[in-house]
Image: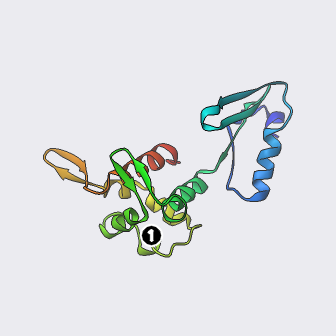
């Protein structure tokens, strides 16, 4: 439909459901009049390929932002149990400590016995309020609270730069 309307499409998003991933795979393999855009970084096993259509341009398949937020929220709790981030680290206890600050906007159920598909909990974790509560005033500015360096990096990178939509 986009081609018929000559509407440029930048990204094609899906939330990870099998039917949506199948649709993305079909679009990624769609024959196009122009060469595909490719990016390879073999050292890390990265191989990206996107079709380019004459009327609409390149089409990049991505996960939708709400699904990405949930995935990032779940990693410290259910996937990667420890992440080293610069001078800090991220573990599930980091999220529990953030909720205990009382000013992060997180609820207990967001960090303990969680519903992995809770969009609201993912929004609250990657909200500016949660990031702000990992910091405190010192002198004339703010500094990251002791024990929150890894969580600050995680929330900043995945919250503000990737999922600000």
Residue at 23% in and 48% down = 143
Q: Where is residue 164 in the image (x, y as percent from the top left)?
A: 49, 47
Residue at 22% in and 48% down = 142
Q: How many labels does the image show?
A: 1
Q: In which quarter of the image is the N terminus?
A: top right
Relative to 22, is 3 above or below?
above
From the viewer's perspective, tell me whether residue 46 is left or right of residue 160: right
From the viewer's perspective, tell me whether residue 109 is left or right of residue 140: right
Q: Position of residue 65 (x, y in %)?
A: 58, 51
Q: Where is residue 46 in the image (x, y as percent from the top left)?
A: 64, 37
From the viewer's perspective, tell me whether residue 101 is left or right of residue 90: left
How was the colour assigned to the protein in this rendering?
rainbow
**SS for dot 1:** helix
Give the image quarter of residue 132: bottom left
How crowded pointer 1 is (Cα within 10 Å; few <14, some 14-19, many 20+) is rated as: many
Q: Where is residue 7 in the image (x, y as percent from the top left)?
A: 74, 34
> Residue under circle 1?
111
Relative to 142, is 33 above or below?
above
Name the residue nearer the viewer: 87 or 102: 87
Residue at 38% in and 66% down = 93
Name the residue nearer the viewer: 131 or 73: 73
Relative to 57, is 70 above or below?
below
* Residue located farthest toward the left when viewing the structure as drawn: 139
Relative to 69, is 97 above or below?
below
Name the residue nearer the viewer: 124 or 101: 101
């Amino acid at each position: 439909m986009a081609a018929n309307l000559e509407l440029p499409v930048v990204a094609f998003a899906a939330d990870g459901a099998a039917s949506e991933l199948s649709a993305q795979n079909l679009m990624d393999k769609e024959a196009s009049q122009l060469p595909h855009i490719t990016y390879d970084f073999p050292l890390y096993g990265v191989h990206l390929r996107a079709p380019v259509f004459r009327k609409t341009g390149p089409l990049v398949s991505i996960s939708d932002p709400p699904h990405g937020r949930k995935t990032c929220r779940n990693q410290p709790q259910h996937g990667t149990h420890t992440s080293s981030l610069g001078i800090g680290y991220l573990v599930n206890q980091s999220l529990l400590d953030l909720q205990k600050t009382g000013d992060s906007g997180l609820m207990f159920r967001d960090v303990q016995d969680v519903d992995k598909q809770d969009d609201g909990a993912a929004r609250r974790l990657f909200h500016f309020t949660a990031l702000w509560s990992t910091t405190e005033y010192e002198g004339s500015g703010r500094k990251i609270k002791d024990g929150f360096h890894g969580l600050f990096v995680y929330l900043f990178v995945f919250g503000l730069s990737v999922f600000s939509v």
